[in-house]
Image: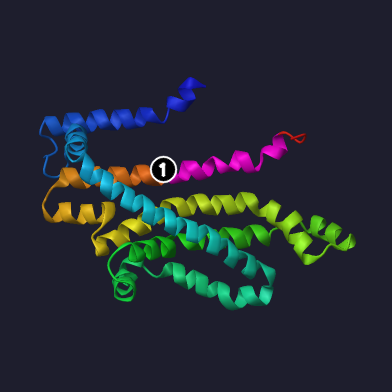
Amino acid sequence: MFFQRLAPLVPLLVLTLAGEGASRSGWLPGYLFPSPSAVLQTLVEDASMYRKAFFETVLAAGVGLAFSMSLGLLAGLVLAASVRIRRMFYPYAIFFQTVPIIAIAPLLVIWLGYGIPTVIASAFIVSVFPVIANSVQGLTGTDPVSLQLFRMLDATPAQTLFRLRLPAALPQILGGFKIAAGLAVIGAIVGEFISGSGLGGLVDASRNQQRVDRVFAAVLLAALLGILFFYLLSMVHPIVFRHDKNPKA
């Protein structure tokens, strides 16, 4: 059990040592690929700057993700309620997802101005579609036999939704939430490229200054933030389905 938990760290350790050796030996020039120790040193020396940028990105990505989960689930419920509604509006949800966020980010600045509203909107736009798609798929994939049983028992649409369709769709919905968690961070970083704040703004400024070590440090923190969001949502799954393991609870 202990080895299984540490197993994912083995490739990371190997890559870190390989990168350190390649950088120190001169095989990889430092101005293109800084050594892991140089990135760590940058994080320590500029800790206050990275801390401020990190929490700005946490706030924007977190709020954007919260909007994605709530509004995306609501949209999924509406689309799943009627075949006609789904045929009318679901293609627009797909089109909404296919528009590159980097192309409309300048428009968000025009509409919302520089600052966190633009970053939140960017995080929301990028991350909402997986929630909608997974919710619709889960809610429309209910076991037909169970649906027939509820009809025989004269269950109301609300009873069918909250006692059958929604519980059966929870695995799909939670899967959409976890996908959206990583995408929200990506959307926030893209929004910050334009607004100049958070980790994205730090990456852009460091790129202009040719500080590759700072770029790597900011990218590392952004990746860790995405992993943190993903695992926080993964922790919800056993809590939601605890009754399956312990029927008496």
Q: Give the range drawn in magenta.
A: 229-245
> Which amino acid type is shown beneath numbered disc 1?
Ile
User: Furthest residue to the top?
Assistant: 2
Residue 1 lies in magenta, yes or no?
no
Number of callouts in the render?
Answer: 1
Quadrant of the drawing holding the C terminus: top right
**83 displayed left or right of 148:** left
Q: In which quarter of the image is residue 135?
A: bottom right
**163 displayed left or right of 49:** right
Residue in the image at 15% along x and 34% along y: 23
Q: Is residue 112 above or below residue 138?
A: below
Secondary structure beneath disc 1?
Answer: helix
Residue in the image at 22% along x and 39% along y: 47
Residue 237 lies in magenta, yes or no?
yes
Q: Residue 162's spot in the image, x, y percent?
A: 73, 57
Q: How is the image coloured?
A: rainbow
| Residue bearing the label numbered 1 | 227
**215 displayed left or right of 131:** left
Which secondary structure dominates the residues rendered in magenta?
helix
Crowd class of label 1 (few under 14; some 14 to 19; many from 20; radius 10 Å): some
Looking at the picture, tell me which residue is in the foreground, 117 or 247: 117
Q: Is residue 14 above or below residue 164?
A: above
Q: Residue 187's spot in the image, x, y percent?
A: 37, 59
Q: Residue 206's spot in the image, x, y percent?
A: 16, 51
Q: In which quarter of the image is residue 29?
A: top left
Q: Residue 7's spot in the image, x, y percent?
A: 43, 27
Residue in the image at 25% along x and 46% along y: 218
